[in-house]
Amino acid sequence: MVSQIQIVENVLKLNDEVAAFNRAQLREAGVLAIGVLGAPGCGKTALLEATLARFGGRERIGVLVGDLATTRDAERLARHAEHVVQINTGNGCHLDANQVRQSLGRLPLDALDVVFIENVGNLICPVNFDLGEDVKVGVLSVAEGDDKPAKHPQFVRAVEALVLNKIDLLPVVEFDRAAFERDIRRVHEDVTICPVSVTQGHLDAWFEWLEQRLSAHRTAEFATHT
Amino acid sequence: MVSQIQIVENVLKLNDEVAAFNRAQLREAGVLAIGVLGAPGCGKTALLEATLARFGGRERIGVLVGDLATTRDAERLARHAEHVVQINTGNGCHLDANQVRQSLGRLPLDALDVVFIENVGNLICPVNFDLGEDVKVGVLSVAEGDDKPAKHPQFVRAVEALVLNKIDLLPVVEFDRAAFERDIRRVHEDVTICPVSVTQGHLDAWFEWLEQRLSAHRTAEFATHT
């Protein structure tokens, strides 16, 4: 079993080297890269559709989107953005840095401000793979139940913002919001929790977080180049 | 990259050998073993709670339940069954045959009729790991959207029954049931689809499938031992 563990570590080490290359490339182009993680059906693509509709007019946005099969998500997103690349992973349960490296090569990075990287629907494996993004955000849905933060502490620790989607379903599903937030704070005290309903267009908490993140990025960019 | 692929194949080969051992052990004891797969929050544990409440009086049931962290699911299930073992996988995104082998050792197999093996919440990785179960069933929820069968064809192919949970939410979520079923039939024509609402107690389709499976198992057992 030791040799198996060593191989996994080698894979992660190689991944981290490619991720560092991606990060350098994105920084060079002044692009803010945001990874989006969450379980199947939590609403990652819908969140990005709404985000592109809101920010697409003023920010130049590219999207990489991972899935085992189909180009459905890329097709949905391509209605709102010019630069969308679908990555089909086949059996692959997460994106890796090399897939992202290849796909970044298909985006005009110098002409972009932001790149979203939507991972494969999975709460577990994507957490361990750095892709070179500046920040990871997580999406959970109230339909998944209030126990997901307790069961997936690594996921909660890995993200800077946690979008709680489908709050329009709160009246019809069992969900203890206090317990949900308590389990989050236990492992990641200062994560920003953004309650939203993408289908109902209630997205203020998420848009506010993103606005602040973009503003902080622009300030840092300005400082770097002056 | 070739060496990486070979290692993965070795791991799967070793897993399959242990799975065959588990299968032989379960057959020897006359136990029907049912793997339960699905995304985080689709309702796997709730389905098993209801199943134990319904069948626990006449079948002797054991449960193995996998999760990254916490013993919450085992605690829920232990209210309805005497023999429940929680397997915490840490970072592990799926159960493997060796974890199941060790946990089966903690169940009195000769005194059981059925063992449910609830996998870690994940639509991808558990599909590739045989645990020695007789049959896999999948759980999807309408809250996850109608596109999951198209995006996860390997998952659909791997299961004999597909429980579609949370149908009570159909009036309040977007879900094209015809498209959902068409995508399923495209990759697995004769899978049994069981629409249920665990929270509302609408479980007839699932109980009916399980009843038939138990009956078929008993007939095969009888033929073997006479």
Image: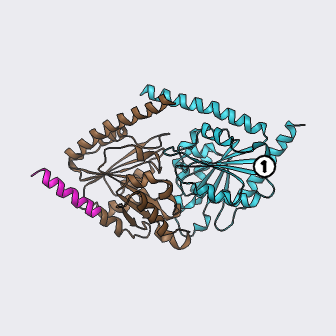
Chain colours: A brown, B cyan
Residue A163 picture location, percent across and down: 40, 62
Chain holding disc 1: B
**The residue under label 1 is which amino acid type?**
Leu
Q: Is residue B199 visible?
A: yes
Q: Which residue is located at x 22 percent, y 61 percent? A: A215
Chief secondary structure of the magenta portion: helix
In the orientation shown, which residue stands out farthest toward the right? B226
Asked whether A224 falls inside the magenta stretch, the response is yes
Is residue A17 within the magenta segment?
A: no
Residue A105 seen in the figure = no
Image coordinates of residue B88 in percent, x first then y, are 55, 47
Q: Is residue B193 left or right of residue A112?
A: right
Give the total of numbered labels. Answer: 1
Locate residue B203, reporting x and y percent.
70, 62
Task: Compare residues B44 and B68 and report the one nearer the observer.
Answer: B68
User: Label 1 crowding class (10 Å Cα cut-off): few <14, some 14-19, many 20+?
Assistant: some
Question: Which quarter of the rendered picture does the C terminus of chain B lie within?
Answer: top right
Using the image as rendered, state which of residue A134 and residue A33 is in the foreground.
A134
Magenta region: A210-226
Q: Residue B133 appears at what percent x and percent y?
A: 68, 41
Q: Secondary structure at mark 1?
A: helix
Task: Answer above or below: position of B222 versus B181.
Answer: above
Judge by depth and name the residue closer to the eye, A61 or B129. B129
Rendered position, B207 above or below B133: below
- Left/right of residue B217 with respect to residue A150 in the rendered view: right
Residue in view at x 65 percent, y 35 percent: B19
B144 to B5, vertically: above or below: below
Residue that protrudes farthest toward the left in the picture: A226
Residue topped by disc 1: B214
Q: Considering only vertical position in the picture, is B1 above or below B203?
A: above
Q: Quadrant of the N terminus of chain B?
A: top left
| Residue at x 62%, y 55% (from the top left corner) | B74
